[in-house]
Image (cartoon, rainbow, N blue to C red):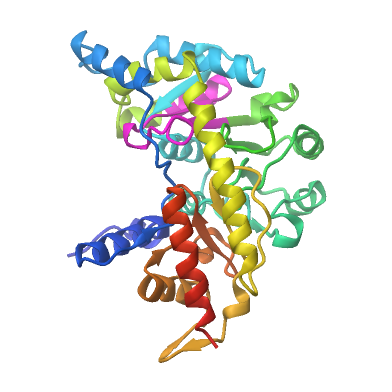
Amino acid sequence: MSLSTLLERFNEPETLRMAKLGRELRAQGIDVIDLSLGEPDFDTPEHIKEAAILAIRDNWTHYPPVAGYPELREAVCTKLKRDNGLEYSVENIVVSTGAKQSLANAILALVDAGDEVIIPTPYWVTYSELVKIAGGALRFLKTDAAGGFKFTPQQVEEAITEKTKLFLFSSPCNPSGAFYNYDELAALADVFLRHPQVYIISDEIYEYINFTGSHSSIASFAELKNRVIVINGLSKGFAMTGWRLGYMAAEKSIAKACEKIQGQFTSGANSITQRAAIAALTDSLKPTFAMVEEFARRRSKVVEWVNRIPGLKCPEPQGAFYVFPDVSYYFGKSFGDTRIGNASDLCFYLLNHAHVSSVTGDAFGEPACIRFSFANSMAKLEEGWKRIAEALNRLN
C-alpha cells in the first residue's frame, strides 16, 4: 500500500500515545495513575448541560453555519469584551471543532512552504506538527527553567528574519505554566511593531486557569491587533473537553480564509455543543472559578512534593495544570536492567515501575523535562507522587 508522503512530515501526539499505553496497562488490571492527559477531572457544569438538553428538544439538530451560529459568535464577542477588553464583531469570529482545529485553520491560512514560524520552547506538541503539515520552516526559541521558561523581547528580536511569517505562543503555557503579564506583553508588542510582516497566534485556551489573578492578551495593543489571531475554547476553562468547541478572533480577511478552509474539512462545529457554548460564555463563571481554586490547592501540594525529590528542578507554574520539572539529574542512572538515557526512558520507567503515566519533554521541545498533570484528585496525586519518589530513589 502506498500512502501519502504527508504522513511522513509529522508525528503522532506524544500526549495521546502515553494515555493509550496507560489504558493498555489498566486493561491488564494494573492500577495506573494518569498524570499525562491535559484534561480537567471535573464534570461540565449543570447549566451548560441543561442548555444542551434544551437544544436537542428544540431541534437544533441541522447543519449549522460553517463559522458558527451568529448567536454564538456574538457570545464570543461579548466574552472577549467582558473578560479581555477586546472589541470584535461577529465577522471576526470563527467557531471550530476544538481549539486544535482553530489553530490548524489559522496556520494553514497564513503559512506557505518555506515561511518561517517561530515557536518558543517548550510548546504544546501540536504546534510544530501543524507547521510541518503546512510546509513551514520551524525556528525554535529556547527558554529554560532558570528563567521560568519565559522568552524575552530581545530573544524574539534576534529570532525574527525577513522570512519570518508567524510567531506562535501560549499564555498560560502548556506544558510549563509560564504566564505573560500586561507589561511583558507590551514589551513584546514593541518588538512585533518593528516587524510588520510577522503575524502572531496567541493561544489562550488556559486563560481562566491562571494563578496570578488576571489574564492579558497581546491583542490588547491596538496597533498590533489586526496581526494577532486569538485562539481559545471551552475544553479547559469549562471542563468541556469531549464537547469539542474552539474559536478564534482575527482580522476579517483571516477569519474569512479560515472559514473557507474549515468549509472543506468539517463545515460547522456540532450544533448542540454550539448552543451549550452560548450558555457557557454568557452565564455565571462561578463553576469555573471553583475549579480553578481547586487547581490552585493541588498546585501548592504538587510543587511541595516535587521539591522534596532530590535532583528535580521545577519553576512554580503560574497557570494551566501541569508541573514541568527538569529531570536530567536522573539521566545515566539505572535500576536493574533499565538504564535511563533521557526523559523518554524515564517516562517509561515511571509507567512500568511506578505505574504513573506522564509525557516526555521531548514532545514539547524540551528534552530535559517531563510534564506531569495535576488534573486528578488530591488522593491520586498524593499516591502518584509517592510512587514517583520511591521509583526515583531506586535509581542509582
Q: Indicate left or right for 137 with 27 as reference.
A: right
Name the residue: 54% across, 35% down.
292
Q: Is residue 159 magenta?
A: no
Q: Position of residue 325 (x, y in %)?
A: 61, 63
Q: Is residue 238 magenta?
A: yes
Q: Quadrant of residue 238?
A: top left
Q: Indicate left or right for 49 with 56 as reference.
A: right
Q: Nearer the viewer, residue 10 or 353?
A: 353
Name the residue: 42% across, 34% down.
235
Quarter holding the C terminus is bottom right
Q: Position of residue 89 (x, y in %)?
A: 55, 11
Q: Indicate left or right for 68 with 58 as reference.
A: right
Residue that extends furthest to the bottom in the rendered view of this protein? 337
Quarter holding the N terminus is bottom left
Q: Position of residue 288 (x, y in %)?
A: 50, 28
Query: In the rendered view, would you say 49 is above or below 306?
Result: above
Name the residue: 58% across, 79% down.
330
| Stretch in magenta | 230-258
Q: Position of residue 388 (x, y in %)?
A: 48, 69
Query: In the rendered view, would you say 319 is above or below 271?
Result: below
**Residue 116 seen in render:** no
Q: Nearer the viewer, residue 381 or 174?
A: 381
